[in-house]
Amino acid sequence: MNFIRISASTFVLALAVMISAATASAQDTTIKTKKQAELLVPRPAFQPVQSMDAATMVALDTLDTSDPRIKILLYDDYTWKYYKDPSFANDDAIFTECWTHEAPDPYRASLESLPDEIALWIVDSLSGYKCPNQTEVFSKFGFRHRRRHQGVDLPLHTGTPVYAAFNGKVRLAKSFRGYGNLVVLRHENGLETFYAHLSKIMVSEDQWVDAGSIIGLGGSTGRSSGPHLHFETRYKGYAFDPEWLIDFKSGVLRHRLFILKKKYLNASSNYVPEDEQEEIDIIEGDTREKEEAAKKAEAERKAAAQVQYHTIRQGDTLGAIARKYHTTVKKLCQLNGISERTTLRLGRKLRVR
Ligand SMILES: [Zn+2]
């Protein structure tokens, strides 16, 4: 599913041009220039793609194009978009190679076997995007409390819908060890996304899903200390930081074309069965860290709130000020970096606490 939403006035003209162009551009994964490639390494949002709202889109009609795989969907608000019939991809190597419903990592690929740079079209005119669960990331990817975290943890309330980030095919949909109820989607670019700890799985293996369809409800199954979505992005079994792709707080996608460099992957990002306590230790560690940071901030705020000043008026002496604020001349001098002989200028602010 795509994003191109064009007003009715430009529809007829655009239609003729784009029917012929659609098939050619959809699968072009080459990097055109070095500059383009450099722009696409992990970085803050440049031209982010908004998370779509599937609920508001009502299709009225479907039109054929010259390519039998590609249809045009017309919407009730006179916008339209291309739609690729996913069943045509069934024989694609992407969806046949290492296709299993059993293991989270069926590839067992060596790091050496991967190319130095992998160009991944994340969205194009035929494929959409939806943030799986829009919220602030609680536990980040990477080493946390001496454990390796293979994804990001996104807090939610049990029962919250979890969305397919991109179009894809359900490779795995079952309870799996520490992941709890787990859905793994494989996408047309070869990328796989993992959705773990679901309270309910709402898709079945081998089913095609569009970006934005509900794949399950959030929960706390498996090794989890509270309801959250554990979300992973993997290529050939190697996990990389999902925040390179998605800004979960705003919900926007950071890249249309993402260049995954081998140097960002390492052997320990390959799939390893989750340690019994892994997810719990990570979340509890982060919870402790956040609580300590909050306590520290509160203590600093309190200390700052206690700071008090006195504006020097006619006739003030250090001794009189000290008595007034139940402190000592020595303390006043310390707080203000002055000596007992310093002349008190009228209007000067003296810190008294
Ligand atoms: Zn996690």
Image (spheres, rainbow, N blue to C red):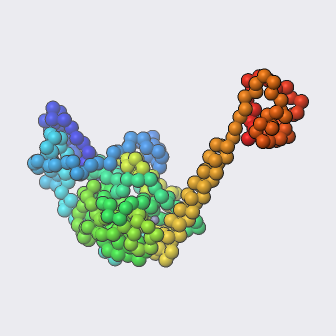
Query: Is 237 placed left or right of 320 in the picture?
Result: left
Query: Is 329 placed left or right of 255 in the picture?
Result: right
Looking at the picture, tell me which residue is in the foreground, 129 or 270.
Answer: 129
User: Residue shown at 23%/63% (left/top)?
Assistant: 208
Residue 197 in the image: state x and y as whole percent: 38, 69
Number of numbered discs present?
A: 0
Looking at the picture, tell me which residue is in the foreground, 201 or 94.
Answer: 201
Residue 61 in the image: state x and y as whole percent: 10, 48
Q: Quadrant of the C terminus?
A: top right
Looking at the picture, tell me which residue is in the foreground, 299 or 2.
Answer: 299
State the image quarter where residue 289 is shown.
bottom right
Asked if one can make out residue 97 in the rendered structure from this viewpoint, the answer is no
Q: Is residue 18 above or below residue 105?
A: above
Looking at the picture, tell me which residue is in the foreground, 228 or 208.
Answer: 228
Residue 69 in the image: state x and y as whole percent: 17, 55
User: Residue shown at 33%/69% (left/top)?
Assistant: 199
Q: Is residue 214 above or below residue 96?
A: above
User: Residue shown at 27%/49% (left/top)?
Assistant: 53
User: Residue shown at 11%/47% (left/top)?
Assistant: 60
State the image quarter where residue 102 is shown.
bottom left
Q: Is residue 287 above or below residue 309?
A: below
Query: Is 220 placed left or right of 275 in the picture?
Result: left
Query: Is 194 placed left or right of 344 in the picture?
Result: left
Residue 96 in the image: state x and y as whole percent: 28, 69
